[in-house]
Image (spheres, rainbow, N blue to C red):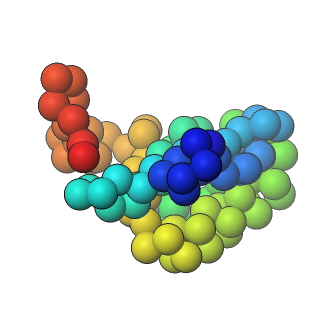
């Protein structure tokens, strides 16, 4: 997004036609992918299941594969925004990631 490779928008249509995930490369934290609505739970990710409410389940399944490939290529960590077990693991304002 900024021309320096630190922030990438990853096309992940399926849940909605124009859905995108955000890949962020932070100097100290490392690379993280914010899933938005592409993945709702860790169980869905682990079992390659798409969310129930989808615009296009086939596109959603393909998006999961694309996400996995991007994570592997960039040695990234997946952050699933709807996963309740991840909530206590994250920092919230005023804390931040570097």
Q: Is residue 36 above or below residue 62?
A: above
Please report the residue visible at 66 percent of the width from the left and 52 percent of the height from the top. Answer: 10
Question: Quick check: 35 left or right of 57?
Answer: left
Q: Which residue is depicted at the point 48% across and 52% down?
A: 6
Identify which residue, 4 or 52, lies in the foreground: 4
Point 50% across, 71% down: residue: 74
Horizontal side of 89 relative to 1 (left or right) equals left
- What percent of the width, then of the height, locates residue 19? 71, 39
- Return the x and y of residue 7 as percentages of the image width and height: 52, 48
Quadrant of image for the N terminus: top right
Q: Position of residue 63 (x, y in %)?
A: 71, 58
In this rendering, is residue 43 above or below 89? below
Kindly indicate the quadrant of the structure image that contains residue 36: top right
Query: Residue 66 in the image: x percent, y percent?
Result: 68, 66
Front residue of 77/47: it is 77
The answer to whether residue 50 is visible is: yes
Residue 75, located in which quarter of the rendered image? bottom left
Residue most toward the front? 3
Say whether residue 2 is left or right of residue 77: right
Is residue 39 or residue 32 the one in the foreground? 32
The answer to whether residue 44 of the structure is visible from this angle is: no
Q: How many marks?
A: 0
Most extreme residue toward the top, as rendered?
94
């Amino acid at each position: 997004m900024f021309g320096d490779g630190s922030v990438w928008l990853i096309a992940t249509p399926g849940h909605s036609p124009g859905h995108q995930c955000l890949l962020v490369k932070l100097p100290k934290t490392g690379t993280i992918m914010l899933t938005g609505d592409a993945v709702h739970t860790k169980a869905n990710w682990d079992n390659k299941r798409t969310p129930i409410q989808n615009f296009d389940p086939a596109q959603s399944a393909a998006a999961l594969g694309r996400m996995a490939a991007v994570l592997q290529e960039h040695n990234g960590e997946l952050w699933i925004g709807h996963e309740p077990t991840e909530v206590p693991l994250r920092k919230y304002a005023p804390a931040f990631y570097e």
